[in-house]
């Protein structure tokens, strides 16, 4: 080879962008759903543990004995709103409106940030009251489940921030692929929202 | 959504749906909190709260995650995951209590 | 099918630097080799741990010759400490299962062979594939490094049962963190395998034209994808127990060494067992299914016959996959679960033996009337059949609640599952190495030294594991530091400890021809043709070894995977990738 121009492997792998005829899907779409299926099993394991421990406990506190329902309600609304801005960002990709895309994606990241700030306030106030994961099983479940969920929010924010910033270069070079990527990031973000929709009543309200 | 060329998607229609779903989710969130304030009997409270959560979750999955118009393969995959999820959720509990009556 | 993006492979022969080519490679073949080599190193390391344990079992309390200076912490003066024995046991299991067999069978063979067999240029997500290997390597290094911690590696068995694991020394924390990396690696790998199989199959390669090996990897990947996350959840909880002081697995009122443990309590040690075995039973099938796949390929090739009952084998695989998720509590019959649920799990356990028997029977019937070539891979594949048979059948008494009361936690259990994975899966892996070596390297391994490897290994494997079945039936408990000498009822079977130990050390010697063969064959000239075994599946359409992008011409499947000895054909094999010879109207 005279000129060692490196051809990215993506170029020779079929169906990275265009769907395969018999499945009607591209690779990334199947990949993210498989990943979400495994996430379902991960949180399923934790929910199963919660059920087992709660049923086995002599007394199980109501969430409001330890936790703040107003903060959590606010967080639920923030996360739902950020899901909406996420789909709006995707819709802006299809409309080819880069300004709107930047705006909505930015709002999505800010929504995640707002959620994390409130989570931080909640955690520190628990620590101030002397409530730690080691205090009792309820708080152990609370900190583990919300902690793992917060890690997911954080990773979603990092991905979204990447597509808002440096990753957005692909908007101009491979628009369809970029739209797929935003959709994929969105699927993860909505899943994180979906998990919270269940965590909220289970931990705070029951 | 994949499989459809992006030019064929009626985005304006989609956006209208997103906003309606957003409104529904907000209202349902308020309802969940309000119901919790009523301090119903634990059985009813759990059933009601989980029903509302399921409705909200389905709205997110169907409209935001586009499951309402997804390809068969994804459905098959999710049914499989849902099945194993149920095993995972129910069986340890049942095994410890030796009967299904205690949950039903 | 839209294959238009798939063209001109010759253009993609670019030269990459050393690091991109061998270390941070995204090429599935390099990653497959990385996985296989690392996996084999860990297998060897895990075997060494076992050989050390066998000394203590054969000669309890006597100083180990030569090695005392090497391990001052675990073998002061050459005499093994009980804690060190526990470390060896726990890490032998962990290493063999999670860092030896799975990386070799799934990461190694799956990565190398699967894309080739389906006619794909690479995995669907090459960078994810690289991350999967690196995550595995980090997890493996953490596990290996934990031996150098001041208190040593994990000591709580590969099952890490709490409450002991919760209060064990720091090695257990390293174990948990290592596991999180290994699980992440498996998840990334599984997603990649599934998407690759679904999306990147060549034109004409419908699911029922897939070679059995691909089916085995496909079902295995589903198991990895859906069974591992619960263990990840459990690992997080045990980590919280150890680091943040929670009591997920610690019951109230726990007393350790005469002192009440200062924890909030209210947890459930059984919960860990549920989450652990929810993974670990499907994991058993992760260990065995790729072995089925390898053996099926080799048997079809060396009998020069189609597999007998290919479709029933595929359906059996799928049923196995499903059922493997609802049998886990048969590991827990003695935890005091009620009779209704033990009856349920006993029934599912008996049911799951049916598809395994169908697959094994189909493989044995495939031999009938074949003109068998006794090549080295075929010898190992043939050795696999009775060995897996013994392993499977000895499992039945364990799956029935009544005999399990007697056999639970005895050497019988060890004999049973080692028959499945050691002379079972590992023989299949050896078969696969001999079979695909020409494809990987372009060179042949020596048939003579292959046979010198096979026969002693076969005899010694049985000398190791069959006596364990006898010891177990005599009531000898596993995990005994002194080899069971404490208990008078073991007296009659104690002599077997020496037999097993000498057989184990002999087995190590029997691997020398293999190791030499593996490395010295690399120095031979590249003489292997593209299809040295005269096989039918698509990987043999690629050159040996395949270049970047795999195939030199576009490939497609024109028929089923095992068209051997088709009447009327001039050759005794009709490859999947050859177009029909009859004049075609098109053109």
Image (cartoon, rainbow, N blue to C red):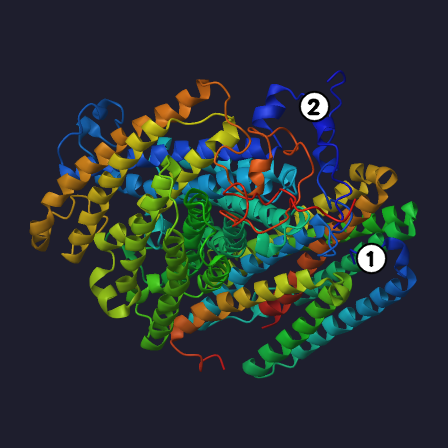
Quarter of the figure with residue C338: bottom left
Q: Position of residue C490 (x, y in %)?
A: 10, 52
- Please give left or right for residue C12 compared with residue C535 in the image: right
Label placed on residue C14: 2
**Residue C206 visible somewhere in the drawing:** yes
User: 10 Å neighbourhood of mark 1: few (<14), some, or many (≥20)?
Assistant: few
The residue at the point 54 percent across, 41 percent down is: C570
In the picture provided, is A39 more to the left or to the right than C411?
A: right
List x then y, in percent, for residue C526.
Answer: 51, 21
Q: Determine the CA span between mark 1 and mark 2.
A: 35 Å
Q: Find disc 1 in the rendering and name its residue.
A: B4
Res C264 visible? no
The chain containing the residue under callout 1 comes to B
Which is nearer the eye, C24 or C384? C384
Q: Quadrant of the C terminus of chain C?
A: top right
Chain hosting mark 2: C
Tell me where residue C325 appears, x and y as whole percent: 46, 62
Q: Position of residue C263 (x, y in %)?
A: 39, 56
Determine which quarter of the picture holds residue C114: top right
Is circle 1 on the same chain as circle 2? Answer: no
Foreground residue, B91 or C295? C295
Q: Which mark is residue A3?
A: none
Q: Secondary structure at mark 2?
A: loop
Label 1 element class: loop
């Amino acid at each position: 080879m005279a000129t060692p121009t490196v051809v990215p492997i993506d170029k020779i792998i079929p169906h990275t962008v265009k769907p395969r005829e018999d499945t009607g899907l591209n690779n990334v779409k199947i990949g993210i759903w498989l990943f979400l299926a495994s996430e379902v099993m991960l949180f399923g394991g934790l929910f199963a543990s919660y059920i087992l421990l709660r049923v086995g406990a002599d007394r199980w506190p109501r969430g409001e004995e330890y936790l703040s329902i107003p903060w959590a309600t606010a967080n639920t609304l923030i996360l739902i709103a950020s899901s909406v801005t996420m789909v709006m960002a995707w819709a802006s990709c299809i409309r080819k409106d880069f300004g709107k895309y930047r705006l909505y994606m930015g709002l999505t990241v800010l929504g995640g940030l707002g959620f994390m700030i409130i989570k931080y306030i909640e955690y520190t106030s628990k620590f101030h009251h002397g409530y730690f994961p080691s205090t009792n099983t309820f708080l152990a479940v609370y900190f583990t489940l919300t902690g793992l969920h917060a890690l997911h929010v954080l990773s979603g924010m990092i991905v979204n921030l990447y597509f808002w910033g440096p990753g957005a270069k692909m908007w101009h070079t491979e628009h369809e692929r970029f739209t797929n990527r935003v959709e994929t990031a969105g699927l993860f973000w909505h899943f994180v929202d979906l998990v919270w929709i269940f965590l909220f009543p289970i931990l705070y309200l029951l | 959504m994949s499989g459809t060329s992006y030019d064929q998607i009626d985005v304006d229609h989609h956006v209208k749906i997103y906003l309606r779903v957003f409104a529904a989710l907000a209202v349902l969130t308020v309802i969940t909190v309000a119901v919790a304030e009523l301090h119903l009997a634990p059985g009813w409270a759990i059933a009601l709260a989980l029903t509302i959560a399921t409705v909200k979750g389905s709205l997110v999955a169907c409209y935001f995650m586009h499951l309402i118009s997804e390809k068969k393969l994804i459905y098959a995959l999710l049914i499989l995951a849902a099945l194993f999820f149920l095993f995972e959720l129910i069986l340890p509990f049942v095994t410890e209590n030796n009967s299904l009556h205690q949950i039903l | 099918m839209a294959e238009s993006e798939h063209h001109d492979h010759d253009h993609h022969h670019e030269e990459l630097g050393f690091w991109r080519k061998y270390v941070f490679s995204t090429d599935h073949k390099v990653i497959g080799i990385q996985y296989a080599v690392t996996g084999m190193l860990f297998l060897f390391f895990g075997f060494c741990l076992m050989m050390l344990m066998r000394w203590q079992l054969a000669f309890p309390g006597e100083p180990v010759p030569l090695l005392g200076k090497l391990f001052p912490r675990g073998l002061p003066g050459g005499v093994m400490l009980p804690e060190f024995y526990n470390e060896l046991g726990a890490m032998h299991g962990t290493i063999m299962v999670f860092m030896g067999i799975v990386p070799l069978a799934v990461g190694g063979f799956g990565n190398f062979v699967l894309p080739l067999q389906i006619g794909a240029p690479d995995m669907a997500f090459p960078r994810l594939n690289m991350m999967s290997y690196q995550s595995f390597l980090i997890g493996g290094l953490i596990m290996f490094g934990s031996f150098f911690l001041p208190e040593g590696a994990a000591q709580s068995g590969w099952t890490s049962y709490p409450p002991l694991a919760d209060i064990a020394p720091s090695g257990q924390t390293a174990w948990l963190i290592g596991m999180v990396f290994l699980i992440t690696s498996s998840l990334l790998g599984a997603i990649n395998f599934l998407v690759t199989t679904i999306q990147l199959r060549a034109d004409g390669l419908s699911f029922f034209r897939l070679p059995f090996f691909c089916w085995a990897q496909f079902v295995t990947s589903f198991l990895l994808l859906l069974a591992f996350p619960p263990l990840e959840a459990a690992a997080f909880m045990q980590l919280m127990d150890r680091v943040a002081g929670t009591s997920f697995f610690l019951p109230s009122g726990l007393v350790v060494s005469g002192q009440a443990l200062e924890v909030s309590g209210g947890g459930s040690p059984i919960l860990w067992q549920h989450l652990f075995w929810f993974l670990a039973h499907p994991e058993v099938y992760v260990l065995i299914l790729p072995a089925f796949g390898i053996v099926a390929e080799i048997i079809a090739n060396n009998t020069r016959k189609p597999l007998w009952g290919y479709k029933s084998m595929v359906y059996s695989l799928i049923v196995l996959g499903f059922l493997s998720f609802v049998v886990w509590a048969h590991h827990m019959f003695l935890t005091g679960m009620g009779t209704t649920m033990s009856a349920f799990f006993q029934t599912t356990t008996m049911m799951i033996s049916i598809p395994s028997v169908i697959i094994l029977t189909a493989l044995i019937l495939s031999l009938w009337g074949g003109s068998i070539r006794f090549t080295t891979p075929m010898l190992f594949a043939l050795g696999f059949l009775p060995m897996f048979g013994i392993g499977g059948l000895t499992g039945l008494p364990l799956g029935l609640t009544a005999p399990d009361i007697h056999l639970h936690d005895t050497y019988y259990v060890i004999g049973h599952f080692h028959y499945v994975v050691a002379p079972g899966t590992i023989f299949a892996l050896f078969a696969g190495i001999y079979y695909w070596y020409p494809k990987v390297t372009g060179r042949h391994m020596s048939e003579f030294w292959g046979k010198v490897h096979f026969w002693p290994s076969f005899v010694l494997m049985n000398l190791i594991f069959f006596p364990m079945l006898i010891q177990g039936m005599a009531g000898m408990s596993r995990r005994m530091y002194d080899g069971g000498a404490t208990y008078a009822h073991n007296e009659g079977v104690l002599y077997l400890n020496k037999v097993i130990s000498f057989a184990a050390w002999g087995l190590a010697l029997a691997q020398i021809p293999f190791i030499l063969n593996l490395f010295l064959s690399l120095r031979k000239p590249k003489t292997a043709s593209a299809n040295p075994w005269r096989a039918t599946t698509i990987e043999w359409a690629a050159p040996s070894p395949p270049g970047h992008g795999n195939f030199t011409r576009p490939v497609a499947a024109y028929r089923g995977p095992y068209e051997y000895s088709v009447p009327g054909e001039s050759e005794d094999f009709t490859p999947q990738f050859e177009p029909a010879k009859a004049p075609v109207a098109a053109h």
